[in-house]
Structure formats: structure tokens, C-alpha cells
Amino acid sequence: MIRFDTVIKNGTVVDGARMPRYKADVGIKDGIITEIGHIEDDEGHKTIDASGLIVAPGFIDLHTHYDAQLFWDPYCSISSWHGITTVVIGNCGFGFAPVAPEARERSMLSMTRVEAIPLASMKEGMPWDWESFPEYLDSVDRTSKAINIVPYVPVNPILISVLGLEDAKAGRLPTDKEHIEMCRLLEESMDAGGCGWSAQRLPPDGPAGVQLDFDGTAMPTDVMHDQTSIEFAKVLRKRNAGHMQTTMVSGNPKADQQHIMDLAKISGRPIVFNVVQVYDTKPQIHRKVIAWLEKCRSEGIRVYGQGLTTDAGYGFTFEDWNLFDECPAWREATVGTKEERLKKLADPSRRPALRSQIPELVTGPFENIVVTGPVSPESQQWLDHTIGLIAEKTGKDPVDVMLDIVVADNLETEFFAAPPGTRLDLLKEVVDVPYILFGVSDGGAHTKFLTAGRYPTETLIKIVRDEKMLSLEDAHWRLSALPAELAGCKGRGVLKVGAPADIIVYDLENLEITPPEIVHDLPGGEWRRVQKAKGYKYILVNGEVTIRDDQQTNTFSGQLLRHGMSTESQREKSAA
């Protein structure tokens, strides 16, 4: 007798809840797991043979910027290719609602630098059939999705909406009346399904002022006052719901840490702190963050770190590159049109300042950057050379070496920079902390530089299979159940009866990440860098197969997961 829509047979279940793996069948009906155990061969309308494969909950990525891309890419790739079945958008306080019609162009311009999303793609690919945040979510709800979407309420548009762009970017302290209106907008947005609020607070004059507006100025969240964050935290306390995501680094780390702890205490809700990153030459940085997280834990304060665990690295050209913004001289020289940037980078009078401010926050050592795509005849000789080696051969300063090539190539030289942390012994120090999440994929952002959406596959290959830093059971808890709990994704992140059937079926021994590619598949004729996966035999979202043998099936079973609503309520609202 047919009892299930789909039965996954003979697999090894890793349930996400850290129970020891076991052999079992999984029965799915109406998008829900309805039975786990022994199921007869003839009880499923469809049967998936998982013999020799791992059956586990889909991964949940808490840090993405698919707010625009989801409208033209139902799969939110590359994330969905790597086993991610749910993504959280609206990170760092950046998003597109509330935005008045006359402010749409300016909001898109901001995202061209702070998250490096191509303007032409946003203009062509976004429907802009909303003004308020609830209307934005309704638009997301109407859009075909092959992946689940969870929305943060981004703070940046709220600041601009209430204070006006000029005052918001100047960091004016809101009046009591303005704080009340901001909190009203936050409440309205959470009523519509926001899972909490997010904010990047990286003042450009601080040590991590690396993600800025299109003109090189601070984003409103960067200069937001602590009191405004506190008012937002009080909203979560009143609702006893939601969580916060913040990236906060200024010149006073102790004050930053205390403020984040205060937000957690005031709200009574969790905070996800970005980012815990390894620097090979400065291990004290991540060790201090870990010590602080342990202090939070000892005091019962729910602050979780999000670890940058991928070593994807950065491929880039100076046509688009902006991640040297931590250094004022580089920031100023890489703002403007291509012609303006080319002129500035060629200007000998600027070179002393550029030589004195060596970027080190995002990439590894400057001299280790590799020339991977020289363009002009005079640059061809430096193919696959590091900047340091060219400097040694030519007797030039490394900065002059790079910029002379860049200028000769009309800004089109391809470079590759490894991340600043590649040492496995230091990575293990981060992996060993159970309240540090894996991720910071930045999915949908920096798509011409970065392919960090591969991180779940990389976790399984490197951290689990090859280096054996973590058990498979613990890895799936960190990749699925823990982020699901923080994001308020009720029932997701685990395989149990009654849970939504977001499931991956994969071959652990043959799992791999394919080499980087450039694909021209964005609206407006734009391109991006991608890396695909091999070994995901089946990926199911809400019970439907969205990927089979690493290929999209063009099945759009994803949902907008409005925070605080049951699965049945989600379906009813989507159907309406």
C-alpha cells in the first residue's frame, strides 16, 4: 500500500541532533518526514536508493546576501549546489526595504560596493514591486524558489527611511520620536516574518572599515549609535522572539564586546557575531575572540561566533576590487569610474601613501598575491608569479609591481589572493569551539571575487573526512541544527518525524568541489565566479527533489519561512 510520496531507502542517517549514525529508511508525505525506520519497498510512490550514502538534514546558511539574486536565480546558487536548503538574507543590516521609489537607485548603488552586486543585474533582475518590508516579503513569497528563505530585518534601510540619507550617513543621534518610529518599523517587519535584525558596524576610520558605500563613505549602520541598537534590542525583549546578527569592530574591542553582551542581556535573545577568522601570523586575534565567547558562555549570555572556515580565496581584477578599503589610500584610489581609478592608480604622487598602507585584513600577505591572468604583452612574463617574486626580480616595491601591471593591463589583470588563515592547526582551534557556527558564505555578494558558498562541502571534505577534526555527527549539528535553532526555523535542521523534509543524500567518500569557473549568467550581461560540487546524489527541499546527481531539476519547492509561523501557516499564506 502506498503510504508515502517518497521513501529514501537503505541510507545511513546522520540526524543533525548528534545521535550516532544508523541505517534506516525515511518516509516523506506532503513535504514532511512521517516515518523513520524500516519501510517496505512498495510503500512509496517514489523510491530513492541511498545504499552506501549519507542521509542528513539540509544545511542552513545564516549569512547570505541573496536579497536581490533570489529574484532571478530560484536556486540561490552557489549555495544550493552545496547542500544548503535554507538561507538567511538581509545580513549586515543591508537590504532593499523599506525603500521609497525615489530611493531605489541609491539603494542599489550602495550594494555595488558594500556587497559588490552588479548594478546592471539589480536593475534588470529586481521587480521593485514593494516599498515596505512586509511588501518586500510578499514579493519574495510570490517568487519561485528552489530553496527556503529566512529574512533578517536589515537596519540600514530603516535608518535611512526615518533619518533621511544625509543624516543617517552623518551618524546623527535619532530623537526619541525617531527611535519610536524605527522600532515601529522593526515591529511591523517582524510581524511580517522577519527573524530579527542585523547591522554591520565597521566605522571607516576603524581597523576593519572594509565594506563601504559606493562612494567610499560609511554606511549608516557603521555610524549608528549604541543607543539605537539598544532600542532595537528592547523590541526583541518585548516580543521574546528573534535574534540579532552583528559585525562590529572599532578601535575599542573591549567596548564592542561589552556592547554586544549588553544587547544580549537586554533582549534576552541570541546574537550571532561575525566574524571569527584565523590569521596565520596573528593567532592572538581569534584566540581573544574565543576567550570572549567563553566568557559569554560562562555568564549565560547567548553570543555565538560565526567562523570563516573556508579557504576559497579571492580571484579579482581592479575593475571591481574593493576589499582593500581598510586602507584609506587604497579606498580613495579605487573609488570612481574605471577611467578615474586607472588614472589614480597610475599617479606616481599617490604611490607613497599606497606603499605605506599595506592591506592585510581580507587577504593573506600582500607579497603572496599571484598574477593569474596578465593581459598586455609586457605583463605576460609574470603569469603565475607572486607579487613578492616579481619584486625580487625587478627590484621594485611590491605595491609598484602590482600597480604597474594593473595600469599596463587597463585594470584587467586577474589576481588570486589566498585568505589570511590557512593553517590547519589554527583552524582546529576554531572548529573545537562548539558555539562557533561555520559559514559566512556571503552568498549572493562579492560574486566576482569569492566562492565561499562552498563551505558546507568543504567542511565535510576537509574538516571531517580528510583531517578528522570533527565527527560527522557533530559537523551536521553545526551545519544544520544549531543554525536552525538560532534562525527560528522550527523543526528544521534535524531528521525526525514531523520535521520538514529538507534532506541531502550524498557520497561522503567521493564528495568534491570543482575548480573555479567564470559564468555569464547574471541579468544585464554580467558574470560571476562559481564552484560546483560533486557527490550530492539528491537534495530535497520540502520533500521535493531539487537537485539530482549534482544537477538542478528545476523544481521550485522552496518557501519563504516567515519567523514565528508554523509550517501549515507558511503554506496557507503562500497559497493565498
Image: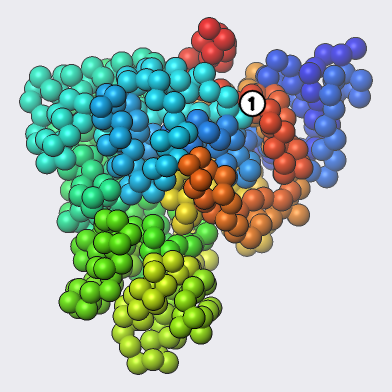
Q: Is residue 406 left or right of residue 489?
A: left
Q: Residue at x 16, y 19 (%)?
A: 180
Residue 60's quadrant in the figure?
A: top right
Q: Residue at x 35, y 78 (%)?
A: 404
Image height check: is 283 above or below 552? Answer: below
Q: Which residue is mark 1?
A: 556
> x and y percent of residue 555 in the render?
68, 28
Image height check: is 433 above or below 539? Answer: below
Mark 1, Cα crowd under 10 Å, few <14 / some 14-19 / many 20+, is some
Q: Considering depth in this image, is 521 or 360 the residue closer to the camera?
A: 521
Q: Residue at x 64, y 26 (%)?
A: 556
> x and y percent of residue 441 in the render?
48, 47
Q: Is residue 449 left or right of residue 244?
A: right
**Residue 75 seen in render:** yes
Image height check: is 311 above or below 556? Answer: below
Q: Considering depth in this image, is 447 or 152 the residue closer to the camera?
A: 447
